[in-house]
Image (tube, helix red, strand yellow):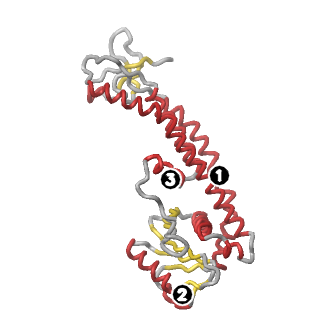
Amino acid sequence: MARRKNSGLAEALFDLTAALPWWVGVVLAVIAYAVLHRYAVMEVPTTLSAGQKGGDMLSAVVIKGLASGGQYLVPLILLAAAAASALGRRKRQGLIAKAGNDATGAALRTMSWRDFELLVGEAFRLRGYAVTELGGNGADGGVDLKLTRGGETFLVQCKRWKAYQVSVEVVRELYGVMAAQGAAGGFVVTSGTFTEPARNFAQGRNIELIDGPALQKMIDAVRPAVANKEKTASAPAVAMAVAAAPAAAAAPVCPLCGSPMVRRLAQRGANAGKPFWGCSRYAQTKCGGARAIEE
């Protein structure tokens, strides 16, 4: 499936987050709301104070306006992407379970080419690779997966063919792309078999040919990891999201310029020695924005 080009910022954010584990999207949504909400509720002065520039006031107005809508829109996009990631992962794990429960190999031979790519990608992911699904160019062309592990890149072509052996031309094509992209190795995965010339060409070129029976063994080996992976990863991540929200929202924003504020101690006057929130840009712009710290 070819990816759309020139997508908007919201679509790009959705696609990027959907490619991550679902719980990452939840964590990002919580943090995004906490951060944007601070700017959405900040006070914007209506008159210039001594030493303040008009550009600072305009910037604060723009930031507040963008944050007012963004505090709801951005988390919504992130949560939708997290849901898409969760559904996608459930589908991939379902394909692993379906293929693993079929000793005859019929499930591999009858599934759609797109599901076959998802299945192969999940199998490599469970073997410890980071997987990028490129989608190839359809049922019969292109590099379908990019794998990374240990700083090295590997390319994968998937051939879900029912009645054909994979020819040497397919292996040559992958080898050419590997050379062009500087990949450390490659895999050609099929539900069928390979011709003898294809196997001969792959020897000594760091290309692994995985036929139907070998793929079945690969799936059987990773099946136990399917249930354990989500169980061990999701609970700590949700706790991280809950903990991250108060931390992100703790420091207020400057009422004059909209910059983050930092905790300071009053050096003189009636409040000497008492803590207060001061503008983090004071040293650069002499912004005198301040807020009291409520104990």
Coordinates of residue 266 in the picture (x, y in percent): 36, 17
Q: What residue does disc 3 label?
A: 15
First in sequence: mark 2 or mark 3? Answer: 3
- Marks 1 and 3 sit apart, C-alpha to C-alpha, by 25 Å
Establish if 232 lies above or below 178.
above
Q: Residues within 10 Å of mark 3 (few under 14, many from 20)?
A: some
Residue furthest toward the top? 270
Establish if 53 lies above or below 234.
above
Residue 149 in view here = no
| Residue under the point 41% across and 79% down | 176
Q: What residue does disc 2 label?
A: 199
Q: Residues within 10 Å of mark 1 (few under 14, many from 20)?
A: few
The image quarter containing residue 257 is top left
- Which kind of residue does numbered mark 2 sit on? Arg
On the rendered structure, is 96 left or right of 76? Answer: right
| Camera-nearest residue between 231 and 134 | 134
- Which kind of residue does numbered mark 3 sit on? Asp
| Camera-nearest residue between 42 and 287 | 42
Residue mark closest to the camera, 2 vs 3: 3
- Marks 2 and 3 sit apart, C-alpha to C-alpha, by 37 Å
Residue mark closest to the camera, 1 vs 2: 2
First in sequence: mark 1 or mark 3? Answer: 3
